[in-house]
Image (tube, rainbow, N blue to C red):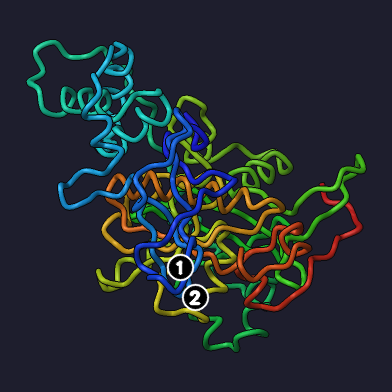
Amino acid sequence: MSANTYRYQLPKKAIKSDCPNCGPKHRRTLSRYIDTTTGEPLPDQYGRCDRESNCGYHLSPYHKGPSGKSYAQEVWARNSVGPIAKEWFTVAGRQKYRGIGRQTILTDLIQMEGATLEQAERVVAYIFDQPARAPLSVVPAGKLCTIPDEVLHQSLGHYERNQFAVLLRNHFGTDVADDLLKRFNIGTSGRWPGACVFWYIDERQRVRGGQIKLFDETFHTVKYIFRDGEKRSATTWVHSAYARRCDQQNLPYPAWLAEYLDEQNDVQKSPCLFGLPQLQDASPEKPVAIVEAPKTAVVSTPYFPDFIWLAVGALSYLNADRLAPVRNRRIELFPDLSRDGSAFERWNRVANELMGLGFRITVSTYLEENATQPEKDAGLDLADFLLDQGLGAYYEGEFW
């Protein structure tokens, strides 16, 4: 089930009514949610006020009310549960075996398997709460593989030949830049001269992956011309670069790399939020801000230090599983711009669903309200606005 199939949505052609928070001075500023199965609007309190910077009213049908249930949950509760597919128990059992929590399993059953909330709750309750009289047939997951800490530590430093570090020092000064490099565990890579490493370290301090990037003088990823004439982005991953170097030098893969590349094992390129080590020393009350790219999280930190800045890694990676480590914090999302506003709409839909799961989450409208159409066409992000830079350049050379 994709985000586009959520039953309750804000339609593209807004249905307007008076905002309950604005009063009589501002009429018809509330965009109302509709039930996509009928096309009918929900009760008039469910909507988002257009005057978000002055009013801020937004009541989602997925937001839990005083009863402890959201409007969506109450509707589902009034309907019959319906048939529950046997394979859903197997799916949930496998996830529990891998250590995945019940709330994430609940979300996955709804979004990935097409279960209703009531059906998913029945499955999760059975898996977690019932005595195991007849255990499900569960296929053990592959070994969880990580990158050794020493590989990370070898990359730290060498900032005089790290283009991203040089850019940070030139823009913010050495003291602020060096604090950012340490805070986010920024590494230096030899994959391309001047390349950096954004390390993805999970809430248990395990190194889950490392993204290598080369930036130009405007903080944008370098594009290069490959030998076949294709234009590519100077972006790769530590495990790929490490394997490439071993192949070039005719060396055997170290044990960690062989396991990491084994398709039978549980490995993802960026399976967690970027910047999670900051949570160790942060107050439990400090809110988090989430952007798409690691660069944006790093650059935004000095401008807005009242947030813990994290990156989800890509537009499609925003989900309850990845946000689990910050579930108990207030969350503000800052999606990148897009030509037609689809990036904002996607994160807004996901945020509505996450609110129904108990997350305290909002989506910033700053970029959508202040960007020009050319800036939207270019897909700029928050860092572009903060740095007040133009578009990146292309490297007209060959990289192998």
Identify whether 114 is placed above or below 288.
above
**Position above or below: 212 against 350:** below
* Label 1 Cα crowd, 10 Å radius (few <14 / some 14-19 / many 20+): many
Q: Secondary structure at mark 1?
A: strand
Q: Looking at the image, is 399 positioned above or below residue 22?
A: above
From the top left corner, tell me how far across and down residue 321 is, in percent. Answer: 37, 43
Please tell me which of labels 2 and 1 falls first in the chain.
2
> To which residue does mark 2 refer?
301
- Say whether residue 347 is left or right of residue 283: right
Q: Is residue 374 visible?
A: yes
Residue at 26% in and 12% down = 137
Q: Position of residue 83 (x, y in %)?
A: 28, 12
Tag on residue 397?
A: none
Distance from Cα at disc 2 to Cα at disc 1: 6 Å
Residue drawn 85% across the image and 47% down it? 231
Q: Which residue is mark 1?
A: 309
Q: Is residue 6 visible?
A: no
- Amino acid type at image mark 1: Trp
**Mark 2 residue crowding within 10 angstroms, few (<14) / some (14–19) / many (20+):** some
Q: Are marks 2 and 1 in contact (CB under 8 Å)?
A: yes
Q: Residue at x 31, y 38 (%)?
A: 72
Where is residue 127 drawn, in percent x and y?
Answer: 18, 24
Mark 2: which secondary structure?
Answer: helix
